[in-house]
Image (cartoon, grey):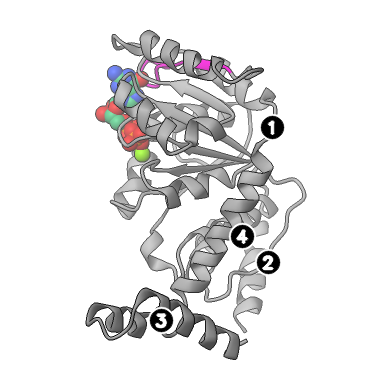
Amino acid sequence: MELSKIDELLDLAKSGDRRSLSRLITEIEQSQDPPKLHSESIWTLGVTGPPGSGKSTLIGKLVMHWSNLGERVAVLALDPSSPISGGSFLADRIRMEGGDIGENVFVRSIASGNSPGGISPRIWPMCHALSLCGWSRIVIETVGTGQSEFRIAALADRLLLVDGPDRGDIIQAEKAGILELADIIAVNKSDLPGSSLAAQSIRTSLDLTDGDTREVLLVSALEGSGIEKLASAIDSCEPNSGRNEVIMREMLISEWDSILLSHPEIDEVIRKLCDSSITIGDAINSLRKSSLKGG
Ligand SMILES: Nc1nc2c(ncn2[C@@H]2O[C@H](COP(=O)(O)OP(=O)(O)O)[C@@H](O)[C@H]2O)c(=O)[nH]1
Ligand SMILES: [Mg+2]
């Protein structure tokens, strides 16, 4: 039933109907069991980094760059703090760049709270749906604060880390393991003092790993400098060989989380934990037993 609705919307969306595309994304977002969609030609870029580092502004520039070349660019903005303004903010930014959210640009904010079992397992079918509908570049913006947000970005084919000139941001990224996973590292706000130093400090920390040839690019999303170089670095980035294992691990963890979070008895188990009538060990055992029973 649910699947045929998705198929129907997908057909309409493929023929260029944007309202159907929006509804399709909503259906996937809210589905109990995310559909298995597959596009051979999918192209995805995850963009992560601390709040305020300029991810949305930079994505706005990249979107304009690609859409001027005739590409169709879709952006999924995941902002758990302000799911609605996240996307519309990005849309405003793109408009500010003198562009319009025209035929070749699709921006959608995703509210992680709307999805049963978390958003992670749904992002992938959304990206495949977009690709099947002819969106040649799919960008996923996540706030690089928590592990779960970072996990989503790590699932993309290539990962761009955006940092600001603030040294604290870089230390955060290092701690979270993002620096290790990023294919491209951009230090944004090169118009501000401290950014060259920040880039240098990242290079130094990469140098400690033998054979790490990743570029650290200085860009200014505000002034539009370094964007073309960044776009070409994105196109020519070598897939990070250590990443597949990490990706598989992250996928497994996020699927596992999703199974746990959508467990019908989870609320009851948490209640019992709160009134100390069971231990964490009991909770795990009982959830495991009942999920086995339920198949
Ligand atoms: N000076 C300067 N400010 C920037 C640059 N890029 C973004 N900003 C500003 O940084 C703030 C946060 O930008 P935003 O794109 O929302 O960051 P996000 O939270 O990472 O998505 C905004 O006030 C932007 O105008 C830049 O290249 N230089
Ligand atoms: Mg943003």
Amino acid type of the residue tagged 1 in the rendering: Pro
Q: Give the number of the mark in front: 3 or 1.
A: 3
* Crowding near the residue tagged with mark 4, few <14, some 14–19, many ≥20 C-alpha atoms within 10 Å: many
Distance, label 3 to label 1, CA atoms, is 43 Å
Residue 158 image position (x, y, % from top left): 61, 36
Give, as a single range, the part of the protein colored magenta. Answer: 215-224
Is any atom of residue 228 visible in this view?
no
Q: Which residue is mark 1?
A: 239
Distance, label 4 to label 3, CA atoms, is 35 Å
Residue sitting at 34 percent across and 46 percent down?
Answer: 86
Residue 204 image position (x, y, % from top left): 48, 13
Res 36 label = 2
Res 282 label = 3
* Relative horizontal placement of residue 164, taking residue 129 as reference (left or right): left
Residue 142 image position (x, y, % from top left): 43, 44
Q: Nearer the viewer, residue 78 or 22?
A: 78
- Callout 1: helix, strand or loop? loop
- Callout 2: helix, strand or loop? loop
The N terminus: image quadrant: bottom right
Callouts 2 and 3 close, C-beta under 8 Å: no
Mark 1 or mark 4, which is nearer the start of the sequence? 4
Q: Nearer the viewer, residue 117 or 201?
A: 201
Q: Which residue is mark 4?
A: 125
- Callout 4: helix, strand or loop? helix
Is any atom of residue 178 visible in this view?
yes
Determine whether 280 is above or below 135 in the image: below
Callouts 4 and 2 close, C-beta under 8 Å: yes
